[in-house]
Amino acid sequence: MKYKIFILIFILLGTFYSCVDKNPNTITEKEIQQENLVKAKNAALTYPINAEVYVPIYSDIYSKNRNTKILLTATLSIRNTSKKDSLFINTIEYYNTEGTLVRNYIKSPIFLKPLETIDYVIEEEDAEGGSGANFLIDWGAKNKITPVFQAVMIGMIGQHAFSFTTDGTTIE
């Protein structure tokens, strides 16, 4: 009898955990980082093409007045647009409105294979960045490529949803 109850509990727990949705962004980020991190360690950290990109992020925006804020979900998307060359990412740093570093998203350089994309999500509840948050991304390539660095913000006011995007700007 004890074994039947144990087996029933085991089956119910297994069924419950298999029904829980996994965040595909988190899985994708970890898989890409682990797979590409190992390979990137063997690559040189200096490249003929090297740049730093600034991407504005709005983790919140003002509504009606300066004292009323709407928290947003923001997604940083890094896209390698090359059909044949890899995009090497050396750093992905997230800064708040005051210009203080909030977090580093990678510990070691990674790379994106041709036409590969990686996303980083600032969740709605994460208000550390503020209305003037931004990412600084240091990247390199062996040949001339034109990667896309973009952010998508989404939010809701009552029953109305909205979204907008920002594009990265290369800085000196």
Image (spheres, helix red, strand yellow):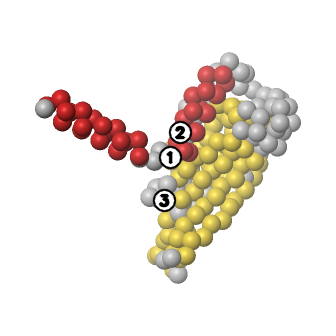
Would you identify the image quadrant in which residue 18 lies? Answer: top left
Outermost residue, bottom side: 64
Q: Nearer the viewer, residue 34 or 99?
A: 34
Q: Residue at x 62, y 46 (%)?
A: 119
Q: Secondary structure at mark 2?
A: helix
Q: Is residue 23 above or below residue 142?
A: below
Q: Secondary structure at mark 3?
A: loop
Q: Circle 1 sits on which residue?
A: 23
Q: Are marks 1 and 2 in contact (CB under 8 Å)?
A: yes
Q: Amino acid at mark 3?
A: Glu
Q: Circle 3 sits on which residue?
A: 124
Q: Residue at x 61, y 57 (%)?
A: 57
| Distance between the alpha carbons at the discs numbered 2 and 3 | 19 Å
| Distance between the alpha carbons at the discs numbered 1 and 2 | 7 Å
Q: Circle 2 sits on which residue?
A: 27
Q: Nearer the viewer, residue 17 or 93?
A: 17
Residue 166 in sight: yes
